[in-house]
Image (spheres, rainbow, N blue to C red):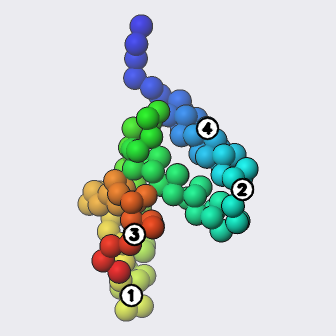
Amino acid sequence: MPREFTEQEIRRQFLNEARMIVAEWSTNKTCRQNQIAGAVFSILALIDGASPTLPGFLLIPDPHPDDKAYRRDRGENWYPEAAEGIDIAGSLHEEFYNPKGE
């Protein structure tokens, strides 16, 4: 009977896809920098949901509980709490080679 995947099954599927990406790019006949960039791009695409085998995933900041006070006291910017729901995934792979707003 069909059922929802478990957390462990999803983690295993994601890591298997990441391993396949590494294996694929490690045999690519290009310079090391292009191999690394290609693997990073492919993993970002996997997170963004551009894979036919897996859905997209949320990628949210999850700072230490003391991070805000620590950084504020040092006069630095801080990351929002995970509960604020800021998800940076969705177009990471597109922006990797074509940065926006920098």
Q: Which residue is mark 1?
A: 76
The local secondary structure at tag 1 comes to: loop
Amino acid on which the number 3 mark rests in the picture: Asn
Provide residue 7's location: percent of width, then percent of height: 48, 34
Compared to residue 4, the image places residue 93 above or below, namely: below
* Disc 2 residue type (three-letter): Lys
Outermost bottom residue: 75
What whole-number distance in Å separates the C-alpha atoms at marks 1 and 3? 28 Å
Which of the two discs, 2 and 4, labels the residue nearer the N terminus?
4
Q: CA distance from mark 2 to mark 1?
A: 43 Å
Q: Which mark is residue 16?
A: 4
Tell me what residue is drawn at x 72 percent, y 56 percent. Answer: 29
Picture quarter with the N terminus:
top left
Outermost residue toward the front in this view: 29
- Report the mark closest to the observer, 1 or 3: 3
**Residue 53 in picture, x, y percent from top left:** 47, 33
Q: CA distance from mark 2 to mark 4?
A: 22 Å
Residue 66 placed where, x, y %?
A: 42, 73
Q: Earlier in the sequence, mark 3 or mark 2?
A: 2
Task: Say which mark, if any, is on residue 29.
Answer: 2
Answer with mark 4 or mark 3, whichever residue precedes in sequence.
Answer: 4
Number of the front mark, 2 or 1: 2
The reply to whether callout 1 and callout 3 are in contact (CB within 8 Å) is: no
Q: Tag 2, which secondary structure? A: loop
Cα distance in 3D space between marks 4 and 3 = 27 Å
Label 2 vs label 4, nearer the camera: 2
**Is 31 in front, or is 17?**
31
From the viewer's perspective, tell me whether residue 33 is left or right of residue 50.
right
Amino acid type at image mark 4:
Asn
Q: Nearer the viewer, residue 92 or 87?
A: 92
